[in-house]
Each structure stands twice: as C-alpha cells, then as structure tokens.
Amino acid sequence: MTLEDLLRSRDARVERQRELIALYPGMTLLCLTVQLPGPVKRNDASLRIARAGVDAVKEAFKPVFEEQRDLETGFEAFFVVDVPLLDAKRICCRIEDTHPLGRLMDIDVITSMSSTTLTLSGPLVMPLGREELGLQPRRCLLCDSPAKECIRARTHTVGELMSKIDEILKNTLNL
C-alpha cells in the first residue's frame, strides 16, 4: 500500500460523497471508515470492525441509501439518513464513544459548503467536527492527549498502536 494509493482512495471517497450529497438533497450523509495505523488497511480484523460499525449505524438510523466498499485501501461505507445534521453527529459520536469497537471506527457526518465554495471538481465536502456540538476531540488510544495531536506528532509507534488494537479486538471479539 503506497501513499499514492491512499490518496487516490481518499479522492475517490470525496468524489462519491459529492455525488451522494447531490443525489439526496436535504438528507444527511454518513461515511464510515475503519481506523488502523500502518500500511495494512484491510484484513480480517478491519472487516470485523467494519461489520460491527455497519450494524451499529443501521441500528441507530434507518438509512434510505447504503453503499459498502471493501477496498485494499480500507473499508468504507456510505449511508444517507433522514436525520438533521447535528442530531446525526450526536448519534455518531455516541456510537464512537460507547460501542466496544467504536474507538476503531470513524463515522463522519459529511456536510457540503455553500455553492460559493467550489473546488475544481465541485462543492467542498467535509466532515462535521465534534466541536460543532461542544464535544471534546477524540482521545488517543494510548494516552489522554487528543488523537489528532498524537497522530501528527507520531507520538506512538505503529507497533504500540496495533498492540492496543489487538487487545481491544481480543477483549471485544474474543479473538
């Protein structure tokens, strides 16, 4: 898995988000991905996390549209729901914070900027942040720092993170 592969996959995901927002105006778009550090983004564990995430989203919402992609660059799923944006974000944060595997999932609520904010390929789409609800950022799996800070600073090794993820999986899925 190369950085180019991951960037192409991310660009394709953003393009699909643009398409779905255009196809379902007035609805809310959710995008589920699995959070695994390192070069391997698809394996048995990631697919088990993905299935648990899909089940949790489908239990919390009644999607009017669902699409799953099992890619070498990582699992991703799109859901269109008829729930207001901020309410959907609250529910997604609750899943991430309370589900036994929630720390390993990222369930983004995607918003589209106004038509005045355009990129070369269409409207700018971006995930709604936890701060929009007054919530604290997600914490690191290994320490109490915000996860984004640890990721940016590379505070922990991939091995340390994978050991913690293995522990979570073992405790949750009895692996």
Image: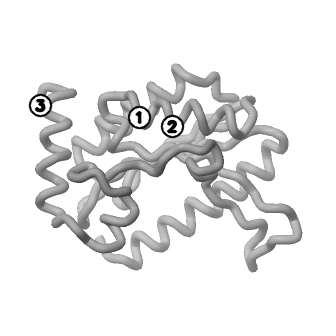
Q: Give how far apart the Cα atoms at labels 3 and 2 are.
A: 26 Å
Residue 12 visible in rendering: yes
What amino acid type is highlighted by mark number 1? Asp
Residue at x-position 19% and y-position 55%: 161
From the image, tell me which residue sits under label 1. 97
Q: Quadrant of the N terminus?
A: bottom left
Q: Give the secondary structure at mark 2.
A: helix
**Mark 3 or 2, which is nearer the eye?**
2
From the image, tell me which residue sits under label 2. 93
Nearest to N terminus: mark 3 or mark 2: 2
From the image, tell me which residue sits under label 3. 175
Q: Nearer the viewer, residue 4 or 164?
A: 164
Label 3 neighbour load within 10 Å: few <14, some 14-19, many 20+: few
For the residues labelled 2 and 1, say whether their Cβ atoms are less than 8 Å apart: yes
Q: Give how far apart the Cα atoms at labels 2 and 1 are.
A: 6 Å
Nearest to N terminus: mark 3 or mark 1: 1
What amino acid type is highlighted by mark number 2? Cys
Is 73 drawn above or below residue 24 in the view shown? below
Residue at x-position 88% and y-position 70%: 116
What amino acid type is highlighted by mark number 3? Leu
